[in-house]
Image (cartoon, rainbow, N blue to C red):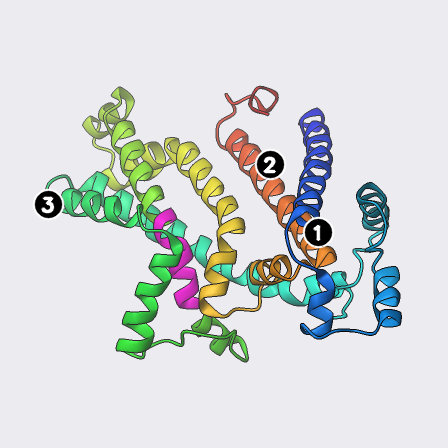
Amino acid sequence: MASYLVRRLVMLAATLLVSSLVVFAGLSAAPGDPLATLSGGRSLPPQTVALLVERYHLNEPFLVRYASWLGGAARGDLGVSIQLRQDVSALIAARAGTTLGLIGYAALIVVVAGVAAGLLAALRPGTVDTVVVAATAVVVAVPPFVAAMALIGVFAVGLRWLPALGDGAGLWDGVRHLTLPALALAAAAAAAVARITRTSVREELGREHVQTAVARGIPYAAVVRRHALRNAAVPIGTLTGMTVASMIALAAVVERAFGLSGLGATLVNAALSKDFAVVQGVSLVLVTAFVLVNTLVDVGAALLDPRITLGGRS
């Protein structure tokens, strides 16, 4: 376990280095001028332009600017936002709560709704199974942005049950504002988890030791819980972890659609304005979270099934 975690830390460092270099290069090559954000499209005096260029190191070569940013990031200094004139670390800390809340809420929906629907389909062959399979086949193909528009149209505009925009104020209002975004983010993932749960549980129910337990008179609910569902936990947990990791990237689309002030929306806005420091800082956080979630998935799978060797799955 220790050697596996060390290898993962090395992989994390390498991934962060490569991804930050790619993002930095992409921003440098993209059209547009970061100073246009500061000036609002107006012409600035030459003295002001020179001062801003020097302050944000815009006149330095690409590798020099990247090395300077990388050195600051290693010390915990992610720079200052050109657009918001705010420290990037403080900006990320202020926006991270919204994204964490959204992904956590969506993950809860994925686990509860996905496993429940899949278990229901596995235990109720016939009409119920057919309905669940058909519904999940449709939902799994719906992109989060399309799901967001549909949910806004039905529950916010049509029925007026839930708010469509903003973060809300306070715990309960915040939960209400996050409900539709979380549903949009979780819909396809929950459908995928439901399908793998159905397949895995049904496969376990057909195994000889499960049939023997039923024949011995052990209550069916106990057989399902102790044998079928427990043995199916590895593929279910692995897919759930992978979908939660994918939500880290997909959250940006949902946050933009619902006007949330999370890291994803901040990343998109910063990329549009070529706000180098913000894009690099948020990308660093998101890539780190993605790798850590995948590592936790691997460790969790090994804990659920001792036959899995972590070193062989890295």
Q: Which residue is drawn at 67% across and 68% down?
A: 94
Q: Where the N terminus falls, by quadrant?
A: top right
Residue 157 vs 228, above or below: the answer is below
Three-letter code, disc 1: Gln
> Is residue 97 part of the magenta span, yes or no?
no
Q: Which residue is drawn at 30% across and 71% down?
A: 153
- Residue bounds of the magenta highlight: 178-189
Residue closest to the eye, 72 or 238: 72
Residue 163 found in image quarter: bottom left
Distance CA(mark 1)–CA(mark 3): 51 Å
Residue topped by disc 2: 295
| Mark 1, other Cα within 10 Å: few <14 / some 14–19 / many ≥20 | many
Residue 8 found in image quarter: top right
Residue topped by disc 3: 127
Q: Nearer the viewer's eye, disc 1 or disc 3?
A: 1
Asked if labels 2 and 3 touch by Cβ distance under 8 angstroms, the answer is no
Q: Nearer the viewer's eye, disc 1 or disc 2?
A: 1
Residue topped by disc 1: 280
Distance CA(mark 3)–CA(mark 2): 39 Å
Three-letter code, disc 3: Thr
Left or right of 71 on screen, residue 5: left
Task: Compare marks 1 and 3 and give the one earlier in the sequence.
Answer: 3
> Is residue 183 part of the magenta span, yes or no?
yes
Residue 202 found in image quarter: top left
The location of residue 54, given as percent across then percent down, is 88, 60
Secondary structure beneath disc 3? Answer: helix
Q: Residue at x 65, y 45 (%)?
A: 26
Q: Residue at x 68, y 35 (%)?
A: 15
Residue closest to the eye, 22 or 299: 22
In the rendered image, is residue 104 in sight? no
Left or right of 161 on screen, residue 45: right
Residue closest to the eye, 61 or 87: 61
